[in-house]
Amino acid sequence: MSDITIAERQAGDVTILDLSGKVTIGEGSVALRNTIRRLLGEGKNKILMNLAGVGYIDSSGIGELVSSFTAVNKEGGTLKLLKLTQKIQDLLAITKLLTVFDVFDEEAEALASFE
Amino acid sequence: MAEKEEFTFPSRFESVEEAALRTEDFARKFGFGDDFISAVDIAVRESVANAVKHGNKLDESKPVEVSLTCSGDWLELTVRDHGPGFSHEDIPDPTEPENLLKASGRGIMFMRTFMDEVEWSNHPSGGMMVKMRKKQ
């Protein structure tokens, strides 16, 4: 059984992914990769990833966030992050990825940024 | 006097979680605090994941050996695989602009960040061993 749950909802043309559980090496990372791949296949390339429910992410999971970001960019889309836990924020700061991702605390503000 | 526990795990991803749980139990037994355990947790997960994936290449016949030692305020963790080894100096700095968007290469940085001392060596009987220490 996977350690990650990915719920999907639509707000206009933005797809919001509510992640919960662990984004780690193995199934967690693969599940995220498959979801992003499917969305891009469906032409959904404005993606907001809500990480509020992610209790743990490892370097492999962070790598998957980066791969998702570049895959979406390649399709002319945008991937942004919402509601980082302190732990995830720390890891993204250490890896200097806060300079790469657009990060928001409020969903409404994040959605408005796609317009 | 130092207290030591040793574990052997098969080379599969589930072993990462098992090793993390054993390490947390060990650290709690000796009274290490939450922040300390949280930092060690990252290091053990990254090092065991490296051993499983890059060292033993998911070959379940090759074990990952973990030893935990508590000595005073220090916790020492060693993780050994049975792979061909690698040079950690060859892993590029993931924070350099040209590497920022690479999917891998951050695990070793996390180990160095969250532990006080990290050193790699070739085990005399084969495989790669990483020894990490952290002081409470």
Image (cartoon, coloured by chain):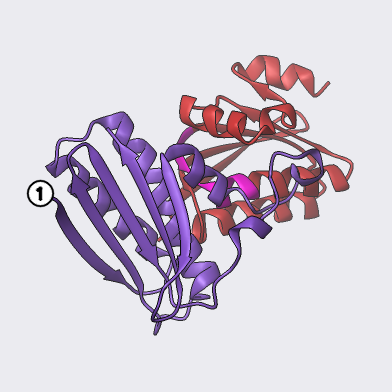
Chain colours: A red, B purple
Question: Is B26 included in the stretch rendered in magenta?
Answer: no
The span picked out in magenta is A53-63
Question: Is A58 included in the stretch rendered in magenta?
Answer: yes
Q: How many marks?
A: 1
Amino acid type, label 1: Met
Image-quadrant location for residue A14:
top right
Q: Residue furthest right?
A: A76
Work out which quarter of the rendered image holds the N terminus of chain A and state it.
bottom left
- For residue B123, say whether it is visible: yes
Q: Residue at x 60, y 51 (%)?
A: A32
Answer few, some or many: residues within 10 Å of disc 1's Cα (few below 14, many 20 plus, some between 14 and 19). few
Q: Return the x and y of residue A5 as percentages of the image width and height.
A: 48, 47
Q: Return the x and y of residue B10 as percentages of the image width and height.
A: 35, 74
Work out which quarter of the rendered image holds the C terminus of chain A and state it.
top right
* Residue pointed to by mark 1: B1
Q: Residue at x 57, y 52 (%)?
A: A60
Q: Return the x and y of residue B2 as percentages of the image width and height.
A: 14, 51
